[in-house]
Image: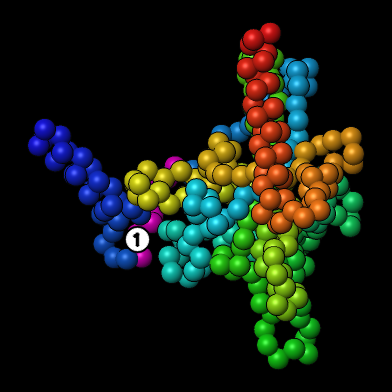
Amino acid sequence: MKNILLFFVTILFTSNLNSQANLLNAKNPSEIGKKQNDEEDKSLEYAEIEDSDILWSKVVYEYIDLNEKLNFPLLYPTTDTDYGDTRKSLWKAIKEAIESGQIKEVYDGRNDNFLQDDLNKIIGKDSLGVVNLNIRDLYGSTWSPSDTQPQQFAKSSDILAYRTKGVWFFDKKHSELKYRLLGLMPVGKNLKVAGAKGGTGYFWLWYPQVREILSKHKVFNDKNNNNRISFDDLLVNRRFSSFIYKYNNVYGDREIKDYITKRDGEDDYQHHLRILLESERIKKQILDFEVDMWGY
């Protein structure tokens, strides 16, 4: 029994030592985080799905609240300068990719259908490869050359949530219910309006375009520092807590709050609870589809 306990204590201890890549072999602090081999982290490509193999599908929009403990790995660290490249929040990874030109296009926050016209699609680089700073304006404060203070841009501590767009579908070829993430939107403080309450959606990202970028950034695992997954693994495998706020429907894709309206004499808590219950009903309906198929 003592040997078993000693084994687990040793594992935990060595996991803490290996919380960062190459920590034990670094001859100076600048070598911490460097990989020991030339292999790059890559995301597993989405499998090709024939339209004829999709028996049923439903597009859903979800809200990932970063106040929930399960979603903390997407939020922290909220200080963007303390850890360098060894640890970063999802927002810092996205913002750095935009400002370095790795993410070449984003979509207007109201364009969740990813329309390709010039009003809804914002190109990140021009034909000469110059970064288009207009994208930064989407998550920055209002600014003009006459202002004495520099323009402010959203930090990790300003991010409140993420919205996602995805599709649940039943693959009749493999007789399996599957999920595919299509869009990701950061929701943060509105820096353009002083004292603004609540969050605003900055822009939509077409998720398949950013998967490879996010696969290179690891999520901190406080249960085992040496066993870390990428942001892509976390999002694609749905290792987060969320609720459905909208799904494709005949009523112009109205949101749940548009038909679960507030009743007379009902307080905000009761109203929000009914919205969450409707969200859970829709989620259960989706997940039950696979069970119903096998029962049929």
Residue 250: percent from the left, percent from the top? 89, 35
Foreground: 72 or 31? 72
| SS type, badge 1 | helix
Question: Vertically, is 125 above or below 57?
Answer: below
Q: Position of residue 85 (x, y in %)?
A: 46, 61
Looking at the image, can residue 146 be seen?
A: yes
Residue 233 horizontal side relative to residue 9, left or right = right
> Is 175 situated left or right of 35 in this image?
right
User: In the orientation shown, which residue stands out farthest toward the top?
Assistant: 296
Which image quarter: residue 246? top right
| Quadrant where the N terminus is found in the figure | top left
Q: Residue at (69%, 33%) from the top-left corner?
A: 281
Residue 35 part of the magenta-drawn span:
yes
Q: Name the magenta segment's main secondary structure.
A: loop
Quarter assignment of residue 33:
bottom left
Q: Which residue is mark 1?
A: 31
Q: Amino acid at mark 1?
A: Glu
User: At 75% from the left edge and 18% from the top edge, which residue is drawn?
Assistant: 55
Q: Is residue 89 above or below residue 216?
A: below
Residue 108: x and y in percent read 80, 56
Does residue 90 appear anywhere in the picture? no
Looking at the image, which is closer to me, 163 or 83? 163
Q: Which residues are magenta?
A: 30-39
Q: Answer whether residue 279 is magenta in the image.
A: no
Give the residue at x 28% y 47%.
Answer: 15
| Residue lying at 67% horizontally and 15% vertically, measured from the top left | 292
Position of residue 277 in the picture relative to residue 31 (left or right): right
Image quadrant for the C terminus? top right
- Name the outermost residue toward the front: 265
**Residue positioned most to the left:** 2
